[in-house]
Amino acid sequence: MLITPDPRMCGTCFTPLEAHFDGFGLLPPLYEHPERDELWDHEAQPVPVDDRVVRTCDFCERANAATAFVTRKAIIGITPTGETQFWTEPWSACETCATFIRNRSPHLLMDRAVALARHPLTGGPLDRPTRTALRRVHIKPLFTKFFEAEPSEVRHQGGDA
């Protein structure tokens, strides 16, 4: 039986946190900030999600997520170090990304995520080889799993969505 971790946000910045399990899922989850271009300036302080949560689009990383999606199937991956990664729900989406999800347009969603990605050091756009690698290695596998998990839309309702 799959154990679904309770949603948590960071008590410092109010960002939703991701849950990570050890290879066997025997220990409680480790909650961490989601990966992003720039490094976080503080350690995650897991607290239950409430109305202070700050939602950004989980697909293009833009602010002001308008809606959210849940999946019928869990999305789980194994990191190169053997750690089990469990992508928590809901998946927040801005209106543009939500439209691509509703229309079942994974390639348009991937195109947007890659086009809006920024270089972690300069903050500028990525060069073509880096965009290609980002899409092939990171974005396409995850977004494919997301669509295969049969997403359905739910609206954000305070901190509970």
Image (tube, grey):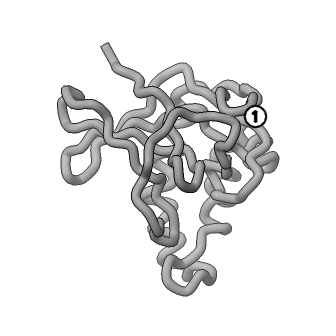
Q: Nearer the viewer, residue 27 or 108?
A: 27
- In percent of the image, x 54 and y 78: which residue is there? 119
Q: Is residue 81 left or right of residue 68?
A: left
Find residue 83 and report its image quarter: top left
- In percent of the image, x 57 and y 50: which residue is there? 15
Residue lying at the far bottom in this picture: please name it. Answer: 122
Q: Name the residue beneath numbered marker 1.
A: 102
**With respect to residue 93, does 153 lie above or below?**
above
**With respect to residue 137, does 84 lie above or below?**
above
**Position in image of residue 138 (x %, y %):** 44, 56
Label 1 crowd bin: few (<14), some (14–19), many (20+), radius 10 Å: few
- In percent of the image, x 67 and y 33: which residue is there? 159
Find residue 62 and report its image quarter: bottom right
SS at circle 1: helix
- In percent of the image, x 51 and y 69: which residue is there? 37
**Position in image of residue 124 (x %, y %):** 62, 83
**With respect to residue 38, does 34 lie above or below?**
above
**Position in image of residue 59 (x %, y %):** 62, 51
**Position in image of residue 143 (x %, y %):** 54, 44
User: Where the C terminus falls, by quadrant?
Assistant: top right
Instruction: Report the number of numbered marks.
Output: 1
User: Where the N terminus falls, by quadrant?
Assistant: top left
Q: Is residue 1 left or right of residue 19?
A: left
Q: Amino acid at mark 1?
A: Arg
Q: Is residue 1 left or right of residue 157?
A: left
